[in-house]
Amino acid sequence: MRLGKRCCAFLLVLALLPGNIARAEAEEVFDPEPWESVEALGSVEDVAARVGAAVLMERETGTCLYAHNPHERLEPASVTKIMTMLLVCEALDGGGLREDQPVRCSAHAASMGGSQIFLKEGEEMRLDDLLKSVAVASANDAAVALAEEIAGSEGEFVRRMNERAKELGMADTTFANCTGLPTEEEHLTSAWDIALMSRALLGHDRIRAYTGIWTDSIRDGAFGLANTNKLVRYYEGCTGLKTGFTQGAMYCLAASACRDGTEYIAVVLHAETSAERFEAAKLLLNHAFAVWQLVDALPDGALPPVAVTLGKEKTIQPVMSGETKLVMKKEEAAALRKELELPREIEAPVAAGQQLGCLLLLDGRGRELLRLAVTAPEAVERLGWGRVFLLCLRSLLTGRTS
């Protein structure tokens, strides 16, 4: 009965979409119905019993809100392609690539197995269609074609992937290819590192136009694409991001969702079934939106100017420095207090970036949660001795200091 239901669903898709459907990883075929339900998870702590590793992170600040085996090194399968897409987006934003430029498929790219769009050697396809095929259908041949376009070879591209991983602080990661296909070489990462590269990828707004697609097509509508990430259709605010499956990696998912301007990333690795990874990610995201809040840590009003004694400028307008957002539980955010510690005057010279004071964020009990620096945006030079002497003389004679 279960097999018959799957066959009917697949035949329905063939009737609805033109041409072929991109072959997905293992059982990850397009299904127009929600995934099969699993035993309900009561709380976020239940995630640990269902998956090998998991991380929940707020995107803007990088604050970790939940972690289970965050640094255990595991196979990521096609979640690898988050790094592939990141390098593509960086090349696009840097002007090294254009979305409309044609990319020619090599024999190596055409030889990829697993999820694919069946590129032929010598076939040309627009770069944005290849990126869409990677983001939506996890196409391995499209990923390799993009890698070769950027770096000349997959090997050189993988070297750049590992270099970028180090720059992002992904200490648990070693990439061996740009697809996540099984390999005899070491190809491992962690839930923590996947959250880091997911955060970096979501820093490129253009990617959401691809990862948020539910169904689409390429080759002028002749070849249909269906997203392997069912959350894109069935979870409010889902912005992506990437599924993965191999026998060794089991079912993996990096999911992202945004509501009311706050975006969270849920990473799930080594789930036994596809349904469990989606349910675990849903629970993590539900927990984030229900319990946590991104708070603007700026002062409630404009910062007052600070007088500068013996300076070439009479005042300086202070500014906030560093991170000005804070993730906290909603009930704590309601009782948040802000206290500004800032002197009325400061003696010159003042250096650019010099700390002038701080803004304290306190909870309802008066405990310090965060201390934000208030700094000078520019330097103020000290007056020369001659000018100081004249000011002192004027003060003695007239009582004025300026």
Image (spheres, rainbow, N blue to C red):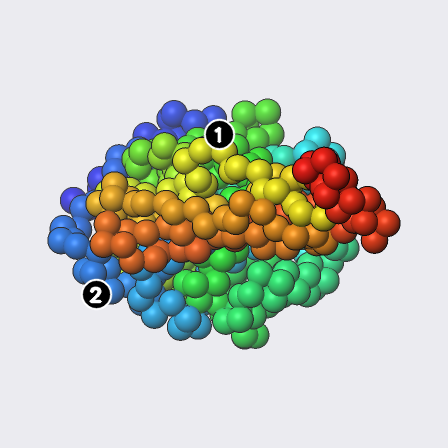
Viewer-closest of 224 and 287: 287
10 Å crowding of disc 2: few (<14), some (14-19), many (20+): few
Residue 206 point in image, percent of width and height? 57, 35
Tell me if I can see residue 263 in this picture: no
Residue at figure coordinates x 23%, y 54% from the top left:
365
Q: Are marks 1 and 2 in contact (CB under 8 Å)?
A: no
The quadrant holding residue 64 is: bottom left
Tell me if I can see residue 340 in this picture: yes
Q: Quadrant of the N terminus?
A: top left
Residue topped by disc 2: 49
Viewer-closest of 369 and 236: 369
Q: Is residue 398 left or right of residue 271?
A: right
Q: Is residue 398 left or right of residue 82?
A: right
Residue at figure coordinates x 48%, y 63% from the top left:
193
Viewer-closest of 110 and 347: 347
Residue type of the residue flagged with mark 2 = Ala
10 Å crowding of disc 1: few (<14), some (14-19), many (20+): some
Residue type of the residue flagged with mark 1 = Asp
Residue topped by disc 1: 216
Residue 19 point in image, percent of width and height? 49, 30
Q: Earlier in the sequence, mark 1 or mark 2?
A: 2
